[in-house]
Image (cartoon, rainbow, N blue to C red):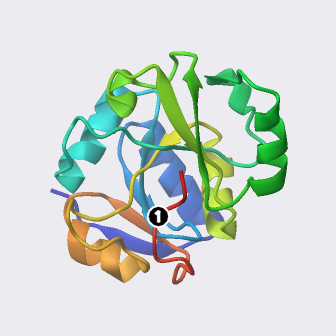
Amino acid sequence: MFDTKVLKINDKSLQIAKDYVLSGEVVGFPTETVYGLAGFAFLDEAVKKIFVAKGRPQDNPLIVHLHKDYDVDKIVKVEYDYVYKLREAFVPGPITMVYKSRGVVSPVATCGLDTVGIRVPMHEGAQAFLKAVDAPIAAPSANASKHTSPVTAEHVFEDLNGKIPLILDGGKCQGGIESTV
């Protein structure tokens, strides 16, 4: 059980979030669509904590979030040249692109599949968080399974208070629905 903190995004809260994530904990963070529940995508135990906090079925793969300057080709294989044009046109943004995985993302996150969904959110707070961590982050929406996706830090707090240590407050999300796949 955690004493869940809600902190505005700043250098101090980003460092706290980074420390939690890289040590295997999960935190809430904003994107332009909904708040996400972030765990280090390379750590099985961190990814398992996402499923537990949400009460999410363990056969439902998670999307991996990256900052805009992260070399996505480190974790995926691009099989078609048109993918680069799609990335140029739509990334960063509210789109998830599915690729063949290089096998470095936790199989818990991919549910053992040989593919992985990648998302690069455009939200300034999400980019600051992802840049601070500088590692792939597995992140579904930050709500209990079957509940409405959260668009404020307060919504995340209502659903996950005591289940996670930190929620980064980046204001209200503009989208309200998950990214397009």
Instruction: Label 1: state its secondary structure.
Output: loop
> Who is closer to the viewer here, 18 or 99?
99
Task: Relative to 44, say whether 46 is above or below.
Answer: below
Q: Residues within 10 Å of mark 1 (few under 14, many from 20)?
A: some
The x and y percentages for residue 79 are 71, 21
**Kind of residue at disc 1:** Glu
Task: Relative to 64, say whether 124 is above or below.
Answer: below
Q: Residue at x 47, y 64 (%)?
A: 178
Task: Relative to 40, say whether 92 is above or below.
Answer: below
Horizontal relation, residue 128 to residue 166: left or right: right
> Who is closer to the viewer here, 123 or 95?
95
> Who is closer to the viewer here, 16 or 56?
56
Question: Looking at the rendering, which quadrant does residue 10 occupy?
Answer: bottom right
The residue at which mark 1 appears reads as 178
* Quadrant into which the N terminus falls: bottom left
The x and y percentages for residue 94 are 61, 62
Q: Residue at x 34, y 36 (%)?
A: 46
Q: Residue at x 55, y 58 (%)?
A: 180
Q: How many marks?
A: 1
The x and y percentages for residue 64 are 52, 41
Q: Residue at x 39, y 30 (%)?
A: 110
Residue at the top extreme of this rendering: 103
The x and y percentages for residue 98 are 56, 36
